[in-house]
Amino acid sequence: MSEPSTSSTVVQPTGPVDHDVDLLIVGAGPSGLYAAYYAGFRALSVAVVDSLTEPGGQLAALYPEKVIYDVGGIPSILGRELAADLFKQAQTYDPIILLGHSAGELTRLDDGTLQVATNTGLLIRAKAILVTAGIGIFTPRPLPAGQQYEGRGLRYFVPDPNALRGKRVLVVGGGDSAVDYALMLEQVAASVTVCHRRNEFRAHEASVQQLRESSMRIMTPYQVSSVEGDGRIEVVEVTDHDTGASERLDVDELVAALGFVAELGPLANWGMELRHRHIAVDTTMATSVPRIFAAGDITDYPGKVKLISVGLGEAATAVNNAAVVIDPSKKLFPGHSSDPGKQPT
Ligand SMILES: Cc1cc2nc3c(=O)[nH]c(=O)nc-3n(C[C@H](O)[C@H](O)[C@H](O)COP(=O)(O)OP(=O)(O)OC[C@H]3O[C@@H](n4cnc5c(N)ncnc54)[C@H](O)[C@@H]3O)c2cc1C
């Protein structure tokens, strides 16, 4: 398994900076990451923007520990491993990767350039846009307390379990992500406690059984009532939902896996024809708005199938068609990556 390289410009939310590129890709899920590779292969300059702070879309956010079997050429791979490999491939041609920024208002400038403002104040100008926004902007469901500790002990993702090696970890939640994270972290953490506000877990039955048979402490029906620490999380108070009794736990890392809310957000105002909250595209993956293409789960057309493999193919089709729109002297067919002279330098 390959780890994400850091050679690209990975930008977390900071002060405003403008970017001018050939292609802006909205969404760093599998479709957007593969599109970033492909656009680089087509010699386009690229910016990728994602509202999440981790690349990988649903793979990283919803099922990092699930095994995926149906991506061509890869017999089996964990969600987080595929996300890491796609991220590494996406960086082949050094795109600008802007994580933690949501694409917001769209403006068409006088010369036809498309300008997108992010929620963080960035302006990205592009000759074309590829929307690979999946099911929309995911927002982690917040903990009832302690949100101010995000990045200082509180996290919503665990892309690399080794970051929590030797730590006392509290995992909060009862769905697949919470239980999968707990099972993964049990291998490396000093201790793992799982706290869920209901007695029943929603996760896959076999995973719940594995959790119950493990040495992890399971606290149900408990929820987090307060978080304390001098700079970083040190103590988490959890309260029994039924009796109101509280307990204080010494905690180094709090993993909040309470699920995500997804919404199309500002993209719904870009003027693209929508069908059932998805973007209608033609066979070139063009939307109804000139110079805007779409690929992956966000698209709708007759016969659409929502799978990683389908999104990857759509991304290649979209980028090759966008390449011709951006520069009409380019050919639609890209040639083969295996052709002499086509290898990345
Ligand atoms: C539990 C589960 C298991 C699955 N298992 C499989 C499987 O085994 N095989 C398979 O083929 N498929 C599987 N899928 C489906 C697969 O994950 C999706 O088809 C795939 O993730 C779609 O990729 P995408 O890049 O189109 O969208 P997504 O993965 O949804 O990524 C979209 C990205 O766009 C970002 N975004 C959205 N709006 C904005 C905005 N305005 N600004 C900035 N960023 C934005 C989001 O933050 C997100 O990161 C599974 C799905 C789930 C939920």
Image (spheres, grey):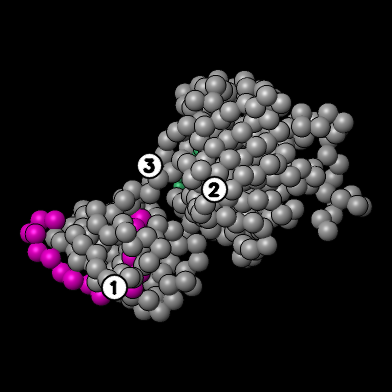
Let me know if residue 164 is in the magenta part.
Answer: no
Mark closer to the observer (1, 3): 1
Quick one: label 2 or label 3, which is nearer the N terminus? 2
Please name the amino acid that badge 1 sits on.
Asp
Mark closer to the observer (2, 1): 2
Q: Residues within 10 Å of mark 2 (few under 14, many from 20)?
A: few
According to the image, label 2 marks what residue? 16
Secondary structure under tag 3 reads strand
Seen as rendered, the residue at the extreme left is: 243
Tell me, yes or no, if residue 255 can be seen here: no
The x and y percentages for residue 85 are 64, 58
Count all numbered tags in the image, as a single digit.
3
Q: CA distance from mark 2 to mark 1?
A: 31 Å
**Is 63 positioned to the left or the right of 182 in the image?**
right
Quick one: label 1 or label 3, which is nearer the N terminus? 1
According to the image, label 3 marks what residue? 261
Please name the amino acid that badge 3 sits on.
Val
Write down the region rendered in magenta. 241-257
Q: CA distance from mark 2 to mark 3?
A: 27 Å
**Is 284 positioned to the left or the right of 137 in the image?**
right
Please name the amino acid that badge 2 sits on.
Pro
Mark 2 CB in 8 Å range of ligand 1?
Answer: no
According to the image, label 1 marks what residue? 230
**Is 340 positioned to the left or the right of 97 in the image?**
right
The x and y percentages for residue 335 are 86, 41
Quick one: label 2 or label 1, which is nearer the N terminus? 2
Q: CA distance from mark 1 to mark 3?
A: 31 Å
Q: Residue at x 47, y 41 (%)?
A: 119
User: Closer to the camera, 31 or 39?
Assistant: 39
